[in-house]
Amino acid sequence: MSKKTETETETLGFQTEVKQLLNLMIHSLYSNPEIFLRELISNASDAADKLRFSSLTNKALLEDDPDLNIHIILDKNNNQLTIEDNGIGMTREEVIDNLGTIAKSGTSEFLKKMTGDQKKDTHLIGQFGVGFYSSFIVANKVVVETRKAGEKSGVYWSSAGEGEFDIKAIDKKSRGTKIILFLKSDQKSFTEDWKVRSIVKKYSDHISLPVKMMKVNDVSDESSDGDDDEKSVKKEQVIEWETVNTATALWTRSRKEIDSKEYIEFYKHISNDFNEPLKWSHNQVEGKLDYTSLLYIPSKVSFDLYNRDTPRGLKLYVQRVYIMDNAEEFLPLYLRFVKGVLDSQTLPLNVSRELLQKDSQTENIKASLVKRVLNMLSKLSKNEPDEYQKFWDTFGDVLKEGPAEDYSNKEAVAELLRFTSTQSQNDKQNISLANYISRMQSEQKSIYYLCASNYEAAKSSPHLEVFRKKNIEVLLLTSRIDEWLMTNLTEFKDKKFQDISHSELDLGDLSSEKDKKEVESLNKEKESFLKRIETALKNEIASVRVTDRLIDSPVCLVASEHELGEQMRQMMKSMGQDMPETKSIMEINLSHLIVKKLESIDNQAKFDKLALTLFEQAQLSSGKQLSNPSDYVKRVNELLMER
């Protein structure tokens, strides 16, 4: 609903989420209020990049003003700060869309993330695309005057951040956007020249667009009335616009000229992340492929990392001209956490997504960048294992998507994987496959692993009993993606992977021929007993057999060789896929007292009751849910009461 005044000003209401956000900005005390300047300069820089790109096909958009820049104007008398750019500008619809609603910026996620910790909360600004609203940390009122390049009229927008904003058409000679901040009384320091200059240098020195501020010079003018002895000196003030930042694209400079602080601030600029990156790689390639890349590994996970449909990719430039923000064609999905810039000298300036998808240069650059990222991570794991562990704890589950998506680099990705195992003291995933192989027994031919819903369930699984007896290490895989990972990672360094929860458990030379023949003999000897159990559980299991994998447990359930495990089945169900019900194989430990008791029971009803109870215990130990828990409890109680 809107209301018009006589001057054709419309007053519109903010989106509900924006009202919440503005209330947060205005009434909360933030530990770092200067971030607003970085956000507004970053927005102005993006506006200039968009104009450069649009002008490639429509030079008229430059309007005889090709020199793009940002001006900052300080007004101590009125306690105002103004930031003006001559970038792409906005239409009325874009102003309402960008400043009145935040439908695409993830504000609801931002609000959910707020913790009440002022420092952490401040760091979320920008990450969720709400940088403009940080203006209200320091301002009582914000005015925006803008005109889209190529349009005839401009737009005026103003708000005090109290639920409504005013908007109207205005005459504006120059294209671009001017933002005027009416500063709060306790934020007067942001009209101090030295302070604003230091903030620009700190946060925006790397931006390729010149950020200019006023510099006042005193100029002396000598005049004479004709008598050489009677001269007067007049002083005049000349105002100049001085570029405050380096105004050179950071990735185009030599690595020797750039210090760590500059790399870190540039990362924050392109990623909207207030945390420092974990690692970065700056590289220039010349020859058949001619490009420069600056790639970053973040230290913290972004809120949308696990949404594979979220726009992601590198910031793409061609011959230093901005092309697009999310060029996803240069890195595979499993490396979607990587941030950075790619500047190609060989791709055409009129590059489009369709061309990127078909172009052989794109594939070659992609292959090179993937190897660079994997090499960066490999060096980090070898030279800084503690830092690599931080990376793995943050992005490990995403990297596990690699073997399925990138066959050519499967081995390199596998070397970066980390797991917990039966030799771990806790659930920390810090064992590499190379570590595991180095500890394998001389007779061991396979890498053994077990998938489970969590670490506690995995380490107490009955499937591990024979491995503990023989002192064989087993990898414990507890992430929901792990079983899917192992369907695509079948071997490493010529060692086959083997899931110990499947029926065909082959210990190879670790198990003697005598043991194998003894199990075969027992299955024949106890055939009638096994058939009796199968009959009792005909609706629950596929078959029953004697096993030597159990030491302390009476029974366990194993999947047939090509059947999906429980972890994979649950993941597929969560994705909305119908999964047909399957029956497991039940293996029994003949030396266990409960199994001996079962064999001695003549009463069929009692036999069936105990057999079903053992089956359901095996279900629980393998992480499955019982179809009727109350019935199970009742049956166990009845068995406990029996003498």
Image: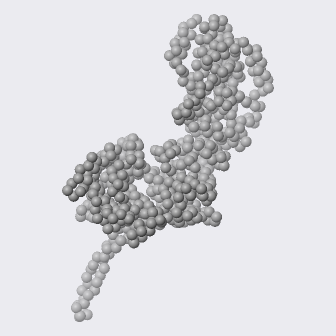
Please report the residue visible at 32 percent of the width from the left and 44 percent of the height from the top: 16
Tell me: residue 348, above or below residue 601: below
The residue shown at (66%, 16%) is: 534
Is 392 on the left or on the right of 232, as rendered?
A: right
**Res 233 → quadrant:** bottom left
Colour scheme used in the picture? one colour
Query: Quarter-wise, where is residue 479 in the image?
Result: top right
Q: Nearer the viewer, residue 347 or 10?
A: 10
Residue 273 position in % (x across, y down): 45, 51
Q: Residue furthest bottom?
A: 227
Task: Name the one closer to the observer, 154 or 628.
Answer: 154
Residue 575: where, in percent of width, then height? 53, 35
| The C terminus - image quarter | top right
Residue 331 locus on image (x, y percent): 57, 52
* Spot occupied by residue 15 in the image (x, y as percentages of width and height): 33, 46
**Vertical placement of 55 versus 512: above or below?**
below
**Camera-nearest residue between 558 and 582:** 582
Residue 261 can be seen in this image = no
Q: Nearer the viewer, residue 311 or 59?
A: 59
Residue at (33% x, 61% y) in the render: 146
Q: How many numbered callouts? A: 0
Q: Residue farthest to the left?
A: 6
Residue at the spot 58% in from the left edge and 44% down from the top edge: 399
Q: Is residue 320 above or below residue 514?
A: below
Look at the image and tell me whether residue 224 can be seen.
yes
